[in-house]
Every structure is written in structure tokens, then in C-alpha cells.
Image (cartoon, rainbow, N blue to C red):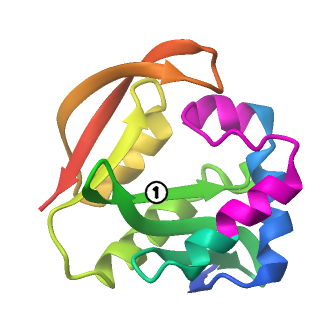
């Protein structure tokens, strides 16, 4: 499905409350499973994001669709590996926005390999990453705070 063009731009302070609302969505948190612990704590959320934005090793971009903040995408070190991650507000799911945002981000990064992680039952995110060229290279089991349970997670690599 093709929707309106997206734009990736640097994150600005006014994006953060939108990200907080998107990441407070219970269904979205369940799908991600390994989300941060600041649920309901805007102050802690802002501290975390401001630290990421001040870290020159972290690349964070806001995903805009028709002038609205649809979510964010970024590249950061995770488990000593350059990794990508993204988050879309639930009203933007299923429109091809995540795939286009990930494609645009990885197209702007020369470093390879890149890595990503996705909960095994998050088929939508797995498809996004595979369509962007990532391949599963392993699995791990770990405790997922948003599900209060141990889950299987795929480790993916883009060469």
C-alpha cells in the first residue's frame, strides 16, 4: 500500500510529547515488548530522550506524514552493535510508513552490518525489516517488561 510521502527530519523538543503518547499505547507496547520503563512518567521519558538527542553516536529522526508526527526511527548502539529501531503511532500502522522510514534511514547510513531485534510474534515489524534487506541470524529469549513474560526475539542483520 502506498500513502503520502514521508519525511525524516531531526527530532525537535515538540516531538517528544507526541512520542510519549505513542509509546504509552498499551497495544503498541505489547507488540514491542522490550520498551523502556517510563510508562506514565513524562519527566523520565524526556530525560531519556534528551540524553539520546545529545549523544553524537545516536541518530534519531522524526517520521512525518503530511505534516503530522507519525513516529520516529533511529540508529544506536545496542549490545555493542550498530542497531536500528523505530516506533509508529498505532494510527499509522499498516500503511507502509515503517518500511519507507527504515529504508530512508538505512540509505543514509554507510555502516554495515546493521542490526535489529524484533519479538518473534511481531510479524508486521519482521516483514518491515525483511523487506528492507535484514535477515534473521539468530534468536534469543529474554524477559519482556511490557508483557511481564519471557519472549522469543529475532536478531536480524543487514549487510
The answer to which of 76 and 135 lies nearer the viewer is 76
Residue at label 1? 85
Q: Which residue is painted at 73% across and 54% down in the image?
A: 89
Percent across and percent down for residue 46 are 78, 64
Q: Which residue is painted at 25% across and 56% down in the image?
A: 81
Q: Which residue is painted at 57% across and 70% down in the image?
A: 52
**Which quadrant does the C terminus fall into?**
bottom left
| Residue 93 drawn above or below residue 72 | above
Please say whether residue 104 is visible from this viewpoint.
Answer: yes
Percent across and percent down for residue 112 are 15, 69
Q: Is residue 143 left or right of residue 19?
A: left
Q: Which residue is painted at 65% across and 28% down in the image?
A: 30
Please say whether residue 3 is visible from this viewpoint.
Answer: no
Percent across and percent down for residue 78 are 35, 52
Q: Is residue 153 left or right of residue 4?
A: left
| Residue 21 drawn above or below residue 3 | above
Q: Is residue 59 left or right of residue 92?
A: left
Residue furthest to the top: 149
Q: Which residues are magenta?
A: 27-49
Crowd class of label 1 (few under 14; some 14 to 19; many from 20; radius 10 Å): some
The answer to which of 80 and 23 lies nearer the viewer is 80
Magenta region, mostly helix, strand or loop? helix
Q: Is residue 149 left or right of residue 17?
A: left
| Residue 75 drawn above or below residue 145 | below
Amino acid at each position: 500500500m502506498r500513502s503520502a510521502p514521508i519525511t525524516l527530519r531531526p527530532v525537535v523538543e515538540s516531538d517528544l510529547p507526541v512520542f510519549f503518547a505513542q509509546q504509552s499505547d498499551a497495544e503498541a507496547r505489547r507488540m514491542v515488548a522490550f520498551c523502556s520503563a517510563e510508562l506514565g512518567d513524562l519527566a523520565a521519558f524526556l530525560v531519556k530522550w534528551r540524553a539520546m538527542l545529545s549523544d553524537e553516536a545516536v541518530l534519531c529522526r522524526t517520521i512525518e506524514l503530511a505534516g503530522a508526527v507519525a513516529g520516529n526511527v533511529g540508529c544506536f548502539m545496542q549490545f555493542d552493535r550498530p542497531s536500528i529501531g523505530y516506533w509508529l503511532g498505532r494510527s499509522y500502522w499498516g500503511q507502509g510508513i515503517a518500511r519507507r522510514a527504515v529504508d530512508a534511514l538505512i540509505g543514509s547510513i554507510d555502516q554495515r552490518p546493521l542490526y535489529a531485534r524484533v519479538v518473534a510474534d511481531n510479524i508486521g515489524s519482521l516483514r518491515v525489516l525483511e523487506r528492507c534487506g535484514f535477515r534473521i541470524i539468530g534468536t534469543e529469549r529474554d524477559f519482556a517488561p511490557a508483557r511481564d513474560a519471557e519472549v522469543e526475539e529475532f536478531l536480524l542483520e543487514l549487510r
